[in-house]
Image (spheres, rainbow, N blue to C red):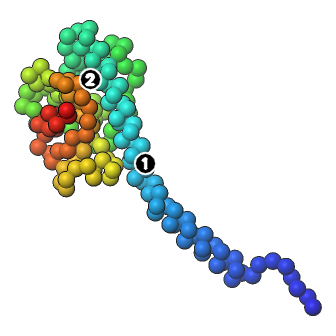
Amino acid sequence: MNRSSGFTLIELLVVIAVLGVLAAGVLTAINPLERLAQARDAQRKTAEGQLVQAATAYFTLKQTYPISATWIQSLVDDGDLKTIPSAAPSPFCYSGNQSGSLVQQNNYCLDQGNGEVVIFVALESSAEKNKCVSGKNPYWLWNSENNKICTVCNDGTGVWYNRASCS
């Protein structure tokens, strides 16, 4: 009797199909796009923390915040910040403050009014969006009045009005 060793084509196809189903299940559970969004949010939060430290150092020396279209570049030029953080993807930078002092660079936003400054950036991950009610977007915001940083939710009417929720 002549027996050949090895697997049949059907057996190989069954194993490949099972591995494909398992791989699809793992990818669904991991959700790599959400993980990438969370990583970008973490990067933005870290960058904003560095911006806050640099802006605070700038204020300590000059008794004013860098209110200009190139406010981050001013922090770099002054030596308070090493590099300009990479651009955040969301262009939305409306604070709602009527002082007219809102400035934006690389979609990191700085606004000033009544001696108070806020620095904020939009967040994108579902984990952050789930902190907000439907129709509102999450922002990572620092408020100079109480030196707090937190997530605020806004529906587009202006982040400035939510600054007090950082407590």
Q: Farthest residue in the top direction?
A: 61
In this view, the residue in front, 90 or 12, is 12
Q: Where residue 113 appears, x then y in whole percent?
A: 10, 24
Q: Which mark is residue 68?
A: none
Along the horizontal axis of the image, is 31 left or right of 5? left
Secondary element type, mark 2 = loop
Residue at 11 percent across and 43 percent down: it is 157
Q: Where residue 48 appears, x then y in whole percent?
A: 32, 30
Residue at 25 percent across and 40 percent down: it is 151
**Dot 2: within a 10 Å radius of its alpha carbon, few (fewer than 14), some, or many (20 or more) residues?**
some
Vertical order, 29 against 68 (above or below): below
Q: Earlier in the sequence, mark 1 or mark 2?
A: 1
Along the horizontal axis of the image, is 33 left or right of 52? right
Q: Which residue is mark 1?
A: 36
Q: Which mark is residue 70?
A: 2
Q: Amino acid at mark 2?
A: Thr
Secondary element type, mark 1 = helix
Tell me if I can see residue 47 in this picture: yes
Q: Where residue 88 appears, x then y in whole percent?
A: 33, 38
Q: Farthest residue in the bottom direction?
A: 1
